Amino acid sequence: MGTILGTVAAMIVGGAVAAVTVVGVVSSQTSPQGDSPANVNAPVVQYGATQ
Amino acid sequence: MRAVPVAWSSLLAVLLLGPALGPGYVLSFDMVWVPDLVLRADVLGVGSSLPRAVPSDAVVAVLDEVLPGALLQDLVLLAALVVGGLGVDRLLVPLDLGLAARLAALTLWQWNPYVVERLVLGHWPVLVGYAALPWVLHGASRWRAEGRCPAWLLLVVPLGSLSVSAGLATSLALLVVLAAGRAQVRRLLAAGGLALAGQAPWLVSGLLHAGAAVTDGEGAALFALSDEGLLPAPLAALSVGGVWNAAVVPDSREGVLAVVGLLVLSVLAALGLASLLRGRGTSARALARPLAVLWLVGWALAVLTWAAPGAVHDLSEVLPGAGVLRDGARLLLLCVPLLVLLVALAVDDAARRLRAVPLPAPAVVVLVGALVLLPVTVLPDAALGVAGRLDAVEYPSSYAGARAALQEAAPDGDVLVLPLSSYRAPDWNGGRPVLDPLPRQLVPVPIASDDLVVDDVTVAGEDPRVRDARAALAQPDPASRAAALGRLGIAAVAEDLTAPGPRADVAGEQVWADERLRVVVLPQVEPRSVPTGWVVVMVLAWAAYLGLPTTGLVLALVRRRRGVDRSRGASPTMRGKLSG
């Protein structure tokens, strides 16, 4: 009984991690990019912006 | 079993770089590769600007004579990830870890905020230094244990010193390992000499430019270690993030996943520390001691830039070279080896315990696999070129045309690059910001803006010739501007017509013009030559740098020869012992 429960728990944990990873990777590729701080209409292109 | 880490490391690297490995060049912030970089004065450290890309540009200029620039860039980026990952695997060999722990260590090494943020920021020489770090640690450990320097370390140290900060990390790692335990003065001196020779090109060039090597203190607060999403800066640094530039931070680092990642990392590190203290043997402790020192130095320096930007400001304005410390998160590479060691120990313990539990093998594999995969789980948008932030593009033909036209005109002097601003966001690069690629495309020594604009604040550059050129451009008419530039040794002006920034018309012969670029050769120029003293000392510096791999090669051959001779002279039994 303990073995079966352990297996199920392992599958749930492992499956959850795998699912979160795959969903994370896929959604990060499909979601729109944030605006770049660079703006060609600005007087110069900026090196970056602090957070 | 050796093939598994190689395959896993390669898979992670390809998954992370993704479209960046396609045909063309990856141009992202400070990462600028061109088809054929010329080995010219500024690349060798005798230009008028600070040696920010010495010796990395010189190494590229030599290697791209053998391989096309785009292919070379792909190989360097791939190798920076895979070689480092395999170095960590090699470093941990004395600990006799299971495969799961080795793969977990490798995953964390290659897939973390430091790697991702530096990659997007274009700090590839730093990542090469990062790849060299585990090999330096391993080589120094062997040197300490066996009493003689491994020949290959003489190649790794210069490779790990392609930029100032990478070189400092390499030198520190080497010296800290050799200073641990009962240090021998002679060995430490030899290691110091090795580190110095590896840093010679940028160090000597920096000394030659000492008058201009104090940096604008404005950069101290802008480039300091930064908060990252929900994580305050010191906590962001614990998870080796906290880069100053928000534009290079993956979205997952801005939300809850970063907190989860830090919590998981902290728990694993604590479990790894407990495992280490409980009795992991002397080899684990011997390895952990210098890594703990490096972690402390890296984290403390990073947090210092956040906690005391005023001190960094004052220091960089008075002490030549101190500006290297202003990018606080850059030295966090020193923290990664200890984190990787502790996580590996924790995962190793967990895997052993799981095997002792009466679970079917597939369930154990799934759980251990989840542990190995955790760095990817909490940073999923690092995949495929950091969610598309890194991509390969081709240069418009204008660049090759402008280069050829200027080469044919063969002006006897340097080329001023306009507009006088450092960064571009060209449409052909998807609007991604990048350091102006035009200076690296051209053959003559470029005079280009080294000002940096962050949050609308300009951090002044150091090159005195740029200041002189700016003053020359302020002359009232094109003819007088051309004359003033000519007196500065500037023989041509190359202008990016698509980029915003300060510019002015200059009189001269137009040798190239299209919708993107224009090149004008000036009528008169007073050529400038590099002082002989500079040439002499830089030749010596390069000789010291290049002498390292040469000596390493000779040393390896001599030792191999001696080993063969000894093996031939020994009895069959002894021969077996010697070869083992």
Image (spheres, rainbow, N blue to C red):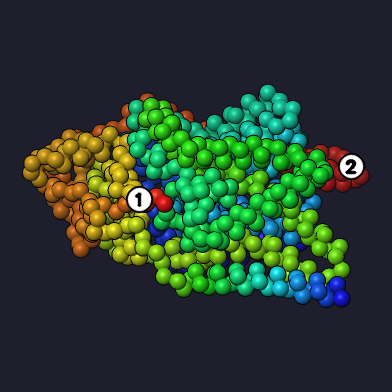
The answer to whether mark 2 and mark 1 are in CB contact below 8 A is no
Instruction: Residue at 34% x, 31% y: name it.
Output: B212
| Amino acid type at image mark 2 | Met
Question: Which of the 4 image quarters holds residue B148?
Answer: top right
Rendered-image quadrant of the N terminus of chain B: bottom right
Q: CA distance from mark 2 to mark 1?
A: 63 Å
Q: Which is more toward the observer, A9 or B83? A: A9
| Crowd class of label 1 (few under 14; some 14 to 19; many from 20; radius 10 Å) | many
Mark 1 belongs to which subunit?
A
Mark 2 belongs to which subunit?
B
| Amino acid type at image mark 1 | Tyr
Residue B16 in view:
no
Q: In what element is the residue under mark 2?
A: helix
Residue at the disc numbered 1: A47
Q: Are marks 2 and 1 on the same chain?
A: no
Percent of width and height locating residue B431: 33, 63
Residue at the disc numbered 2: B574
Q: In what element is the residue under mark 1?
A: loop
